[in-house]
Image: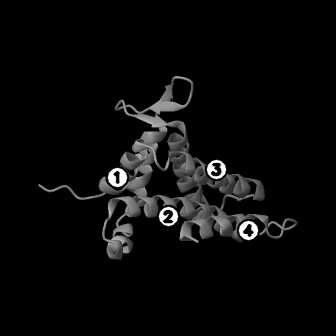
Amino acid sequence: MPHHDELLILARQMVDRNPGLQVEAELRRAVSTAYYALFHLLIDEATDRLVQIATIRHRVARTFDHTIMKKVCQEYADATAFGVGEYKIKKNGQTIPTALFNIAVTFVALEEARIQADYNLKADVTRAQAAADVGRVEAAFKNWLLVETHHATDDFLSELWCRGMPKRT
């Protein structure tokens, strides 16, 4: 089983364990783990598609940057509705499937939720909030199955990686 799938299962288990107790540390870890499940899903898919030499994929995977990935996802999340809701259009005119838009929106939201869960110890993380965050990532994984072969997905994955590469001067 891929690492990202294991992380998502673990996040769900942490939310569902001890339903009568509010174990906030475990709920915080569930939110963080759910984010990392999506983070690693996107990295795994990108490296599988973009890196032909299997033995270096793990090294390439380490070059992905959370901030760059969030910025790319924010641009995809800023797309506007087109037609009957099946597609959206980015500001640059690129048409993307709504499922890819949903993945981008989820990435942005979960990256922010992870930062809150990991670093803002003054704000409570409730079971309902953690369950909703894990549920969003579960939905993103289902959306992935809808768009994994769409041509716009290749562009998306390429941008997640390539935007972080230094420019030559």
Q: CA distance from mark 3 to mark 1?
A: 22 Å
Q: Secondary structure at mark 3?
A: helix
* Rendered-image quadrant of the C terminus: bottom left
Task: Write down the residue under mark 1.
Answer: 158
- Picture residue at 35% right of the left edge, 50% below the top: 159
Q: CA distance from mark 4 to mark 1?
A: 32 Å
Task: Write down the residue under mark 2.
Answer: 40
Q: Secondary structure at mark 4?
A: helix
Residue 91 in view here = yes
Mark toward the start of the polypeptide (3 vs 2): 2
The location of residue 47, given as percent across then percent down, is 38, 63
Q: Residues within 10 Å of mark 3 (few under 14, many from 20)?
A: some
Mark toward the start of the polypeptide (1 vs 2): 2
Q: CA distance from mark 2 to mark 4?
A: 18 Å
The kind of residue on which mark 2 rests is: His
Q: CA distance from mark 1 to mark 2?
A: 15 Å
The kind of residue on which mark 4 rests is: Gln
Task: Write down the residue under mark 4.
Answer: 13
